[in-house]
Image (spheres, grey):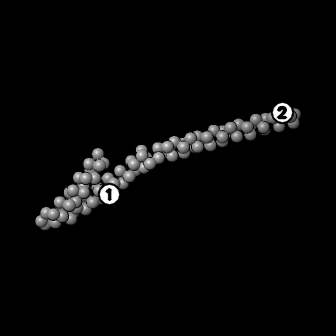
Amino acid sequence: MTGALTIYSATFMRYALAVQPKNYLLFLCHFVNEGAQLTQGYRWMQYHKWGGKEEMAKQQAASGVKAVVGKVEAEAGKLAEKAKDVVGK
């Protein structure tokens, strides 16, 4: 759909300036839409074709590991305190 809208906007930008009188408002609308569609196309390519999906999976895995490490360290700290209390008695 993005590809079709990119071509559509580019085509009608040209026709907005080809008619008499020139329709600058229509041209501007299609110009903005062209930019938005190109941006969406770039984002799709970045995610699906240029490694964005794999990078996101790596970041999620790394954040999950950090969360688990934090929980383990907290539990280890609690157990160390309990052990000190038991040994101290």
Please identify the quarter of the rendering in which residue 16 is found. Answer: bottom left
Taking the image as shown, residue 42 lies to the left or right of residue 61, namely: left
Position of residue 5 measured from the top left corner of the image (x, y, whole percent): 26, 50
Position of residue 57 measured from the top left corner of the image (x, y, whole percent): 51, 42
Q: Secondary structure at mark 1?
A: helix
Residue at image mark 1: 35
Indicate which disc residue 55 carries: none
Cα–Cα gap, marks 1 and 2: 68 Å
- Look at the image and tell me in which quarter the C terminus lies: top right
The first of marks 1 and 2 along the sequence is 1
Q: Is residue 61 above or below residue 10?
A: above
Does the CB distance between marks 1 and 2 fall below 8 Å? no
The amino acid sitting under disc 1 is Gly
Taking the image as shown, residue 44 lies to the left or right of residue 51, namely: left
* Residue at x 39%, y 47% (from the top left corner): 44
Residue at image mark 2: 86
Give the camera-side residue of 87 and 3.
3
* Residue at x 22%, y 60% (from the top left corner): 13
Q: Name the outermost residue toward the bottom.
A: 21
Position of residue 21 measured from the top left corner of the image (x, y, whole percent): 13, 66
How many numbered badges does the structure rendering display?
2
* Residue at x 47%, y 44% (from the top left corner): 53
Q: Is residue 32 above or below residue 57?
A: below
* Residue at x 62%, y 43% (from the top left corner): 66
Camera-side mark, 1 or 2? 1
Q: Is residue 71 above or below residue 30?
A: above
Q: Secondary structure at mark 2?
A: helix
Position of residue 2 measured from the top left corner of the image (x, y, whole percent): 30, 48
The amino acid sitting under disc 2 is Val
> Is residue 23 among what the camera can see?
no
- Look at the image and tell me in which quarter the N terminus lies: top left
